[in-house]
Image (cartoon, grey):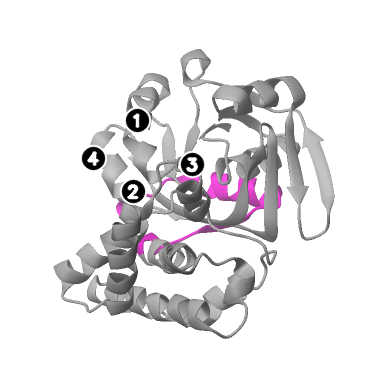
C-alpha cells in the first residue's frame, strides 16, 4: 500500500514516523521550514515520558511536487484547512484511493465525502499527544497512539480497510476498524473538545487536570454534555467516557497542553469554532442543554475577538 499523509504535525508526523520506521511506503506533505528540515535532516521524535530521541529519514514534499497516486490518503490537517486539501486530493487520487480524515472536529468524513463523491472517504479519529517542537522535530507527550477508522455505511466497506488496519498495527500503532465509527468519533470528540475548551478557559496544563479542582470538574462536566449530545444524535456511548478520558489524560506529561491552546497563544488560526462553538450550536439543534460549554464559549468569544 502506498500511503500519503497530508500534514506532518502532531497528528500526521507520528503516523508518518512509525509507518516509515516499519518500512511502509509513505510520503509526508509538509511546507516551509518543517519541510526543509524533514528533507535535509529527517524526522526526529522526542518522547517526553522516557527521554528518548530518535531520527529517521522520511519522504517529504509539498503539494506542488507530489507526483504519485496513493492507495491511502491520511488527512491530518486542522479543521480550518480541510477544504484546502480537496483540489490536491482530486489531482492525485485514483478510482480506488481511500481517504481517511483524522481531524479533531466531528463530522469531517461526511463533509469531505460530499466534495469527493468519486472515491471512498471514511471517518477517523486518533488518540495522540504530540506537537512540532522545532522544524523537523516532534515532541510526543505520552505513549498513547491509537487510530480508529471506518465507514459510516457498512455497505461501503472494502477489504483494503482491513489491510490498512493490519499495516498500522504492524508499526506499533493501535488500530481499530470500527463498525460504529460515528460513535467512536464522538467518543474521541468527548476528550479532545473538553480538554481543549477547559484548557483554554483555565489556561491549564495536563497537571491541572490530574488533580481535583475547577479545571478537572469543568473537563468532566463537558464530557457529560457531549455524552448527552451523542445520545440525542443516535450514537449513545456504551462506556463511561469520564473515567476513560481521565485515564487517557493520566498518560500525558504534566506540562502537556492542547494544540488549540498552543495555536491561540501563538496568535495562529485555531479550531475553536469546531471544538467549542459547534457544541453550543449542536446543543440548540438537538435540544440538549450544554451550560458548561455555553459558559466557556461566552468567555472565549469575548477574549479572542
Between the residue at mark 3 and the residue at mark 1, the CA separation in whole angstroms equals: 12 Å
Where is mark 2, residue-wise? 108
Which numbered tag is attached to residue 84? 1
Above or below, comparing residue 274 to residue 280 in the picture: above
Residue 226 x, y percent position in the rendering = 34, 73
The quarter in which the N terminus is drawn is: top right
Above or below, comparing residue 250 to residue 36 in the picture: below
Image quadrant assignment for residue 174? bottom right
Quick one: label 3 or label 1, which is nearer the N terminus? 3
Q: Residue at x 40, y 81 (%)?
A: 221
Image quadrant assignment for residue 79? top left
Where is mark 4, residue-wise? 114
Circle 1: is it few (<14), some (14-19), or many (20+) Cα within 10 Å? few
Where is mark 3, residue-wise? 76
Span shown in magenta: 155-182
Q: Are marks 2 and 3 in contact (CB under 8 Å)?
A: no
For label 4, the SS is helix
Quick one: label 2 or label 3, which is nearer the N terminus? 3
156 in the magenta segment: yes
Amino acid at each position: 500500500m502506498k500511503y500519503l499523509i497530508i500534514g506532518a504535525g502532531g497528528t500526521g508526523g507520528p503516523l508518518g514516523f512509525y509507518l516509515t520506521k516499519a518500512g511502509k511506503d509513505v510520503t509526508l506533505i509538509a511546507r516551509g521550514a518543517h519541510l526543509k528540515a524533514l528533507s535535509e535532516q529527517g524526522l526526529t521524535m522526542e518522547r517526553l515520558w522516557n527521554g528518548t530521541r530518535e531520527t529517521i529519514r522520511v519522504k517529504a514534499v509539498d503539494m506542488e511536487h507530489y507526483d504519485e497516486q496513493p492507495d491511502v490518503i491520511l488527512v491530518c490537517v486542522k479543521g480550518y484547512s480541510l477544504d484546502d486539501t480537496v483540489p490536491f486530493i482530486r489531482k492525485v487520487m485514483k478510482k480506488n484511493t481511500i481517504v481517511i480524515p483524522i481531524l479533531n472536529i466531528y463530522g469531517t468524513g461526511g463533509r469531505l465525502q460530499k466534495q469527493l463523491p468519486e472515491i471512498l472517504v471514511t471517518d477517523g479519529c486518533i488518540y495522540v499527544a504530540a506537537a512540532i517542537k522545532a522544524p523537523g522535530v516532534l515532541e510526543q507527550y505520552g505513549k498513547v497512539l491509537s487510530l480508529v477508522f471506518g465507514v459510516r455505511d457498512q455497505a461501503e466497506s472494502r477489504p483494503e480497510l482491513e489491510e490498512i488496519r493490519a499495516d498500522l498495527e504492524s508499526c506499533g500503532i493501535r488500530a481499530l476498524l470500527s463498525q460504529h465509527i460515528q460513535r467512536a468519533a464522538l467518543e474521541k470528540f468527548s476528550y479532545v473538545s473538553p480538554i481543549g475548551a477547559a484548557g483554554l478557559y483555565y489556561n491549564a496544563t495536563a497537571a491541572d487536570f490530574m488533580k481535583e479542582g475547577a479545571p478537572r470538574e469543568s473537563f468532566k462536566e463537558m464530557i457529560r454534555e457531549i455524552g448527552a449530545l451523542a445520545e440525542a444524535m443516535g450514537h449513545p456511548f456504551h462506556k463511561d467516557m469520564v473515567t476513560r478520558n481521565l485515564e487517557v489524560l493520566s498518560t500525558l506529561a504534566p506540562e502537556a497542553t492542547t494544540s488549540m491552546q498552543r495555536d491561540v497563544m501563538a496568535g495562529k488560526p485555531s479550531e475553536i469554532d469546531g471544538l467549542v462553538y459547534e457544541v453550543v450550536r449542536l446543543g440548540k439543534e438537538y435540544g440538549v442543554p450544554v451550560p458548561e460549554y455555553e459558559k466557556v464559549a461566552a468567555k472565549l468569544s469575548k477574549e479572542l475577538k
